[in-house]
Protein backbone atom coordinates (compact mmCIF):
# COMPACT_ATOMS: atom_id res chain seq x y z
CA UNK A 1 0.00 0.00 0.00
CA UNK A 2 1.19 3.52 -0.85
CA UNK A 3 0.05 7.09 -0.23
CA UNK A 4 0.74 8.78 -3.57
CA UNK A 5 3.40 11.07 -2.07
CA UNK A 6 6.43 10.75 -4.35
CA UNK A 7 9.70 10.38 -2.43
CA UNK A 8 12.15 10.97 -5.27
CA UNK A 9 12.59 11.22 -9.00
CA UNK A 10 14.40 8.12 -10.16
CA UNK A 11 15.70 7.14 -13.58
CA UNK A 12 15.33 4.11 -15.82
CA UNK A 13 18.79 2.56 -16.20
CA UNK A 14 17.99 -0.34 -18.50
CA UNK A 15 15.25 -2.74 -19.50
CA UNK A 16 16.16 -6.28 -20.51
CA UNK A 17 13.74 -8.76 -22.05
CA UNK A 18 13.75 -11.94 -19.98
CA UNK A 19 11.60 -14.13 -22.18
CA UNK A 20 8.24 -14.11 -23.81
CA UNK A 21 6.30 -11.13 -22.54
CA UNK A 22 8.45 -10.02 -19.60
CA UNK A 23 11.36 -7.75 -18.75
CA UNK A 24 13.87 -7.06 -15.98
CA UNK A 25 13.95 -3.32 -15.34
CA UNK A 26 16.74 -1.52 -13.49
CA UNK A 27 15.89 1.82 -11.86
CA UNK A 28 18.16 4.30 -10.10
CA UNK A 29 16.78 5.65 -6.83
CA UNK A 30 19.32 6.37 -4.06
CA UNK A 31 16.67 7.29 -1.49
CA UNK A 32 14.21 4.44 -2.00
CA UNK A 33 17.05 1.89 -2.15
CA UNK A 34 18.68 3.13 1.06
CA UNK A 35 16.77 0.52 3.08
CA UNK A 36 15.37 -1.66 0.29
CA UNK A 37 15.69 -5.42 0.38
CA UNK A 38 14.73 -8.32 -1.85
CA UNK A 39 10.93 -8.65 -1.86
CA UNK A 40 10.15 -5.06 -0.90
CA UNK A 41 7.56 -3.08 -2.85
CA UNK A 42 8.37 0.18 -4.63
CA UNK A 43 5.88 2.13 -6.75
CA UNK A 44 7.31 3.22 -10.11
CA UNK A 45 5.06 5.82 -11.76
CA UNK A 46 2.27 4.36 -9.69
CA UNK A 47 2.96 0.71 -10.53
CA UNK A 48 3.76 -1.54 -7.57
CA UNK A 49 6.92 -3.51 -8.40
CA UNK A 50 8.78 -6.06 -6.29
CA UNK A 51 12.48 -5.55 -5.67
CA UNK A 52 14.59 -8.42 -7.02
CA UNK A 53 18.03 -6.97 -6.28
CA UNK A 54 19.69 -3.77 -5.03
CA UNK A 55 23.15 -2.63 -6.09
CA UNK A 56 24.68 0.81 -5.55
CA UNK A 57 21.48 2.83 -5.50
CA UNK A 58 19.91 0.86 -8.36
CA UNK A 59 17.16 -1.72 -7.88
CA UNK A 60 15.86 -4.24 -10.36
CA UNK A 61 12.33 -5.56 -10.70
CA UNK A 62 10.61 -8.16 -12.85
CA UNK A 63 7.83 -6.69 -15.00
CA UNK A 64 5.34 -9.14 -16.46
CA UNK A 65 3.67 -8.79 -19.84
CA UNK A 66 0.33 -7.98 -18.22
CA UNK A 67 1.94 -4.97 -16.54
CA UNK A 68 3.67 -3.85 -19.72
CA UNK A 69 0.38 -4.03 -21.65
CA UNK A 70 -1.87 -2.37 -19.07
CA UNK A 71 0.43 0.45 -17.94
CA UNK A 72 2.71 3.06 -19.50
CA UNK A 73 5.87 1.34 -18.19
CA UNK A 74 6.42 -0.36 -21.53
CA UNK A 75 6.97 3.04 -23.18
CA UNK A 76 9.81 4.03 -20.83
CA UNK A 77 13.40 4.09 -22.09
CA UNK A 78 16.82 4.37 -20.38
CA UNK A 79 17.27 7.88 -19.04
CA UNK A 80 13.56 8.53 -18.56
CA UNK A 81 12.62 9.94 -15.12
CA UNK A 82 10.14 8.05 -12.94
CA UNK A 83 8.26 8.79 -9.73
CA UNK A 84 9.34 6.51 -6.88
CA UNK A 85 7.66 5.75 -3.55
CA UNK A 86 8.36 3.04 -1.00
CA UNK A 87 5.46 1.13 0.54
CA UNK A 88 3.86 3.01 3.43
CA UNK A 89 4.71 2.03 7.00
CA UNK A 90 1.85 1.58 9.47
CA UNK A 91 3.29 4.27 11.75
CA UNK A 92 3.68 6.88 9.00
CA UNK A 93 1.37 9.79 8.17
CA UNK A 94 -1.10 9.29 5.32
CA UNK A 95 -0.22 12.42 3.36
CA UNK A 96 -2.15 11.56 0.19
CA UNK A 97 -4.77 8.81 0.01
CA UNK A 98 -4.80 5.00 -0.03
CA UNK A 99 -3.04 3.88 -3.21
CA UNK A 100 -2.63 0.21 -4.13
CA UNK A 101 -0.19 0.53 -6.98
CA UNK A 102 -2.62 -1.36 -9.23
CA UNK A 103 -3.11 0.70 -12.38
CA UNK A 104 -6.70 0.84 -13.66
CA UNK A 105 -5.85 2.26 -17.07
CA UNK A 106 -3.60 4.49 -19.13
CA UNK A 107 -4.74 8.08 -19.67
CA UNK A 108 -3.29 10.86 -21.80
CA UNK A 109 -2.33 14.49 -21.25
CA UNK A 110 -4.64 16.59 -23.44
CA UNK A 111 -3.97 20.15 -22.25
CA UNK A 112 -1.75 22.24 -19.97
CA UNK A 113 -2.69 25.74 -18.79
CA UNK A 114 0.08 27.57 -16.89
CA UNK A 115 -0.89 30.15 -14.27
CA UNK A 116 1.13 32.38 -11.95
CA UNK A 117 1.65 29.88 -9.14
CA UNK A 118 0.29 26.60 -10.47
CA UNK A 119 -0.68 24.76 -13.63
CA UNK A 120 -3.95 23.17 -14.64
CA UNK A 121 -3.53 19.89 -16.50
CA UNK A 122 -6.32 17.99 -18.24
CA UNK A 123 -6.19 14.24 -18.85
CA UNK A 124 -8.25 11.94 -21.05
CA UNK A 125 -9.78 8.96 -19.25
CA UNK A 126 -10.07 5.41 -20.62
CA UNK A 127 -13.61 4.19 -21.17
CA UNK A 128 -15.19 2.90 -17.99
CA UNK A 129 -13.16 4.90 -15.47
CA UNK A 130 -15.09 8.17 -15.55
CA UNK A 131 -17.75 6.87 -13.14
CA UNK A 132 -15.10 6.59 -10.41
CA UNK A 133 -13.82 10.16 -10.83
CA UNK A 134 -15.63 12.98 -9.04
CA UNK A 135 -14.90 16.64 -8.45
CA UNK A 136 -12.81 17.10 -5.26
CA UNK A 137 -12.22 13.35 -5.12
CA UNK A 138 -8.84 11.63 -5.21
CA UNK A 139 -7.03 10.07 -8.16
CA UNK A 140 -3.49 8.81 -8.70
CA UNK A 141 -1.63 9.96 -11.82
CA UNK A 142 1.76 8.32 -12.41
CA UNK A 143 1.87 7.56 -8.70
CA UNK A 144 0.99 11.09 -7.55
CA UNK A 145 -2.02 11.55 -5.27
CA UNK A 146 -4.06 14.43 -6.70
CA UNK A 147 -7.40 16.13 -6.08
CA UNK A 148 -9.75 16.28 -9.06
CA UNK A 149 -10.58 19.90 -9.93
CA UNK A 150 -13.15 19.14 -12.67
CA UNK A 151 -14.51 15.95 -14.18
CA UNK A 152 -16.25 15.28 -17.49
CA UNK A 153 -17.55 12.26 -19.39
CA UNK A 154 -14.09 11.21 -20.60
CA UNK A 155 -11.69 13.66 -18.94
CA UNK A 156 -10.66 15.26 -15.67
CA UNK A 157 -8.38 18.11 -14.67
CA UNK A 158 -6.10 18.77 -11.70
CA UNK A 159 -4.14 21.73 -10.38
CA UNK A 160 -0.42 21.14 -9.94
CA UNK A 161 1.45 23.24 -7.38
CA UNK A 162 5.11 24.22 -7.91
CA UNK A 163 6.39 21.40 -5.67
CA UNK A 164 4.57 18.77 -7.74
CA UNK A 165 5.77 20.34 -10.99
CA UNK A 166 9.37 20.35 -9.76
CA UNK A 167 9.63 17.04 -7.94
CA UNK A 168 7.56 14.65 -10.09
CA UNK A 169 7.42 13.61 -13.74
CA UNK A 170 4.14 15.51 -14.11
CA UNK A 171 6.15 18.71 -14.47
CA UNK A 172 7.59 17.57 -17.80
CA UNK A 173 4.72 15.58 -19.28
CA UNK A 174 3.69 16.92 -22.68
CA UNK A 175 0.36 16.85 -24.50
CA UNK A 176 -0.06 13.34 -25.92
CA UNK A 177 2.07 11.64 -23.26
CA UNK A 178 0.58 8.57 -21.54
CA UNK A 179 0.06 8.42 -17.77
CA UNK A 180 -0.83 5.62 -15.38
CA UNK A 181 -4.17 6.12 -13.62
CA UNK A 182 -5.47 4.53 -10.45
CA UNK A 183 -8.91 5.60 -9.28
CA UNK A 184 -9.89 5.72 -5.61
CA UNK A 185 -10.33 2.09 -4.51
CA UNK A 186 -13.12 3.15 -2.12
CA UNK A 187 -15.26 4.13 -5.11
CA UNK A 188 -14.89 0.66 -6.60
CA UNK A 189 -15.84 -1.05 -3.35
CA UNK A 190 -18.90 1.18 -2.94
CA UNK A 191 -20.01 0.38 -6.50
CA UNK A 192 -19.64 -3.35 -5.88
CA UNK A 193 -21.50 -3.22 -2.57
CA UNK A 194 -24.39 -1.19 -4.00
CA UNK A 195 -24.56 -3.48 -7.00
CA UNK A 196 -24.75 -6.56 -4.77
CA UNK A 197 -27.46 -4.91 -2.66
CA UNK A 198 -29.49 -4.14 -5.77
CA UNK A 199 -29.08 -7.67 -7.05
CA UNK A 200 -30.14 -9.05 -3.67
CA UNK A 201 -33.32 -6.99 -3.55
CA UNK A 202 -34.48 -8.48 -6.86
CA UNK A 203 -34.36 -12.05 -5.67
Image: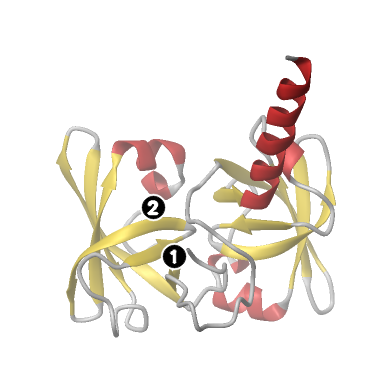
Expressed as whole percent of the image width and height from the top left, the position of residue 169 reads 54, 66
Give whichever of discs 1 and 2 has the lower sequence position. Answer: 2
The residue located at (46%, 44%) in the rendering is 71
Is residue 130 among the parts visible in the rendering? Answer: no
Q: Quadrant of the C terminus?
A: top right
How far apart marks 1 and 2 lie (CA) works out to 9 Å
The local secondary structure at tag 2 comes to loop
Expressed as whole percent of the image width and height from the top left, the position of residue 172 reads 58, 65
Q: Specify the label residue 25 is tagged with.
A: none
Question: Mark 2 highlights which residue?
Answer: 76
Image: 29 above or below 123: below
The local secondary structure at tag 1 comes to strand
The residue located at (78%, 54%) in the rendering is 157
Q: Quadrant of residue 132?
A: top right
Is residue 168 among the parts visible in the rendering? Answer: yes
The residue located at (81%, 35%) in the rendering is 153
Judging depth in this view, the residue of 175 and 134 nearest the camera is 134
Image: 108 above or below 120: above
The residue located at (27%, 77%) in the rendering is 36
Crowding around mark 1 (Cα neighbors within 10 Å: few <14, some 14 to 19, many 20+) is many
Are the residues at dot 1 and dot 2 in contact (C-beta closer than 8 Å)?
yes
Amino acid sequence: MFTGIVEELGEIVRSTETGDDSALVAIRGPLVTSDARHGDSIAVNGVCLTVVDVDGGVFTADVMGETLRRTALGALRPGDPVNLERAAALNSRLGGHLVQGHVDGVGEVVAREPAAQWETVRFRLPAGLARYVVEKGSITVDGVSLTVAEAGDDWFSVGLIPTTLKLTVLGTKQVGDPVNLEVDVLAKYVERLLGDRGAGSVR
